Amino acid sequence: MTSAVKVLLVDDETGILDALKILFKGEGYEVAVASSGRAALESLERERPDLVLSDIRMPGADGLEVLKRARDIDAELPVILMTAQASLQSAMRAVNEGAYYYLQKPFSNDELLAICRRAVEARQLKVENKRLKKEIRRRAPDATPRPIGRSRGFVEVLKLAETVAPTDSTVLLSGESGTGKEVVARFIHRLSERAEQPFMSINCGALPESLLESELFGHVRGSFTGAVKDKDGLLVAANGGTFFLDEIGEMSPATQVKVLRAIQEREVIPVGATEPKVVDVRIIAATNRDLEEEIRKGAFRSDLYYRLNVIQLRLPPLRERKEDIELLALHFLERLAGREEVGVPRVLSPEALDVLMGYDWPGNVRELENALERAAVVAVGGAIVPQGLPERVRDRPEVRLADEPPPPNPTMEVIERAYIHWVLQAEGGNKTRAAEVLGIDPSTLYRKLNRYGLAE
């Protein structure tokens, strides 16, 4: 064992601590000691050990607190816990909270040293693996494909995303619906140290409050009707990885409090449970709302906003990045080429490109993708032409086909469609609020959106 490996020994019994110190020094370890949990908490930051061996039962701060602090400082730091009063419940809790091993006193020196060697080797492999992956990403940045775009504003967003990706800082993505916030979130995850771990996401506006809490935090059996067994939430499922909270502005104040606690304490309490579960996730949140305005209206908590808004990236709408439209269109057509309903690869005609460039794309990149999918499916031959694009995209005087007559006076349907479109834009794509402004049920609004080709 090389002297470069440092072990922190923690026990409130002086005799045991002295014996362990002699044992580990004899094996070539560099040894630091702490005679209490409180002293260990201070030593962790100062000593930066490669391995921690700690008793569980100590006055003041116990071994589980030492474990939690150790994993906060370094998620790969192996912690071995010792106790003379072992129980299945305490062993399970220690392992669930990230202990490398749970050892019952008395134990043999050979057993202890073997476990410590395995722990150090596992740590060294993980550290080396991370170093190699980081080096590969540094030398071959193209190995992680960037989101499509060359416009100045979008490139600046990607550069900042690449800068913050290796950190664990919380990121807030803002921008209109359909601008590609989840695409950028996944890009950050792929460039991060957590790239090999899960990327999980949830749309906070797509679920009712009770179901959203269950999906986020999990639940225990019997906590509500239909909870027939325990279920881990998505935050636990994403442990070690990245969790994407989409449309965070749609979350109720009650759920905001619980999310704030999860971010601050790095633990969640499942619905109906009393014991928390430790989680280690990087949070990326997204919104199409002005959260500062929501705070002024009392609809969003300022403390949660400041927790989320460590790094903010504003994604520009497609109308502000016109030079990206052709790139995106060609990318979508290439991706569509392998689908059965599309068949042969499609070529974008110059006339169709002119139409795409002249439209404002209120639905942004998502609307562009949907429009091209429609055009590719209905195309005759291999070319995308203006007639195949949705009417709302091509029905403008400057792009009307030469043989088309001037438009007649608008019908009530045309006026209604335009008004719904305008309200939806004014409400930032929020269909629930748009329905309230229009004075109709959300279900009625969804039917009209489908009827007028405005659904996304």
Image (cartoon, rainbow, N blue to C red):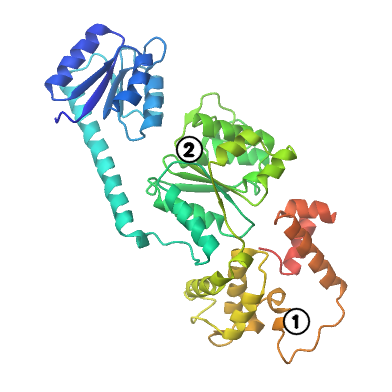
Quick one: SS at disc 1? helix
| Side (left or right) of 318 relative to 345 | right
| Side (left or right) of 86 relative to 26 | right
Quick one: SS at disc 2? helix
Q: Quote the CA–CA distance across marks 1 and 2.
A: 54 Å
At a point 41% along the width and 21% down the height, the residue shown is 65
In x, y percent, where is residue 397?
75, 81
- What amino acid does circle 1 point to? Pro
In x, y percent, where is residue 250?
67, 45
Looking at the image, residue 316 lies above or below residue 166 = below
Looking at the image, residue 366 lies above or below residue 349 = above
- What amino acid does circle 2 point to? Val
At a point 69% along the width and 82% down the height, the residue shown is 399
Give residue 31's quadrant in the image.
top left
For the C terminus, the image quarter is bottom right
Q: Is residue 299 visible?
A: no
In x, y percent, where is residue 126?
28, 41
Q: What mark, if any, has residue 236 been given in the picture?
A: 2
**How many neighbours does mark 2 have within 10 angstroms: few (below 14), some (14-19), or many (20 or more)?**
many
Q: Which residue is mark 1?
A: 397
Q: Is residue 94 visible?
A: yes
Q: Nearer the viewer, mark 1 or mark 2?
A: 1
At a point 66% along the width and 76% down the height, the residue shown is 358
Return the disc, 1 or 2, that comes first in the chain's sequence: 2
Residue placed furthest toward the bottom: 403
Looking at the image, residue 434 lies above or below residue 453 = above
